[in-house]
Amino acid sequence: MNSEVVGQPGGKDAFEKEKVAAMRAVVEEVDPQAKEVDDYTLTRFLRARDLDIDKASTMFLKYLKWKKASVPNGFISDIEVKNELAQKKMFMQGYDKKGHPIGVAVVAKFYCSKGGMDEFKRFIVYILDKVCNSTPRDQDKFLCIADLQGWGYSNCDIRAYLAGLDILQNYYPEKLGKVLLIHVPYLFMKAWKIICPFIDKRTKEKFVFVEDKNLKATLLEEIDESQLPEIYGGQLRLVSIGPTED
């Protein structure tokens, strides 16, 4: 379905719309399933590849193939990620000053679950869909607070981190607004040096390390106190992502 390009500033620019139309012709010829995807989605892939039609088309077709194999029902159900949900490590509530939903990741609770890597990948998709589908299309980027307090070697699963980044960068382009890394232990920087080369330039710029002494002030630059979780000096309680959420 061909809907009008909407979304971020410049989304209705004539040049960009021409690019979207050209990309649509390419991807629909290769995979007819592309006809079911709206222009807004194609625009995200184009922007992720600096409006290069060939690169964006390749990226998008890879996404379609991945979605058929990894999310055949179109969504991930609670039961498919029950072990990950049981760890109560992802929370979602409130909106930043741009109207983007806020997710909170308690990274010290990230352990290899009983479901192994396959379930972890499904969990990443589950989280991203939950967060991104909680707002209108023109506000579907999100802000993440990654809380590393208590993080240690037992949480250092580089393979899982890279798998999560791969899904975010390649299959959810232009969805991430910003990641605020807080309570960062020195030990984590060793893992970051390993992970960093696998993060593309556009995504890397969205990761911000916040010093403890500037924590609340930095959070309040992005989030009103009424939308900030209580544990960071705000007014909202943490609500875990999962079947029991309100």
Image: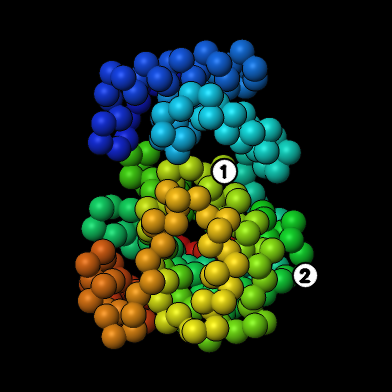
- Viewer-proximal residue, 154 or 136? 154
State the residue at coordinates (49%, 84%): 186
Is disc 2 surrounded by few (<14), some (14 to 19) or many (20+) residues within 10 Å?
Answer: few
State the image quarter where residue 72 is shown: top right
Residue 180 showing in the rendered view:
yes
Of the residues shown, which amino acid type is indicated by label 2?
Answer: Lys
Please say if 233 is above or below 69.
below
Please say if 231 is above or below 52.
below
Where is residue 215 shown, x and y percent of the image?
30, 79
State the residue at coordinates (33%, 53%): 100
| Mark 1 vs mark 2, CA separation in Å | 26 Å
The residue that disc 1 covers is: 170
> Which of the image's four quarters has the C terminus?
bottom left
Residue 126 showing in the rendered view:
no
Of the residues shown, which amino acid type is indicated by label 1?
Answer: Asn
Where is residue 182 shown, x and y percent of the image?
40, 76
- Viewer-proximal residue, 125 or 159? 159
- Viewer-proximal residue, 105 or 133? 105
Residue 160 located left or right of residue 24: right
The residue that disc 2 covers is: 114
**Earlier sequence position, callout 1 versus callout 2:** 2
State the residue at coordinates (38%, 48%): 141
Q: Nearer the viewer, mark 1 or mark 2?
A: 1
State the residue at coordinates (60%, 49%): 167
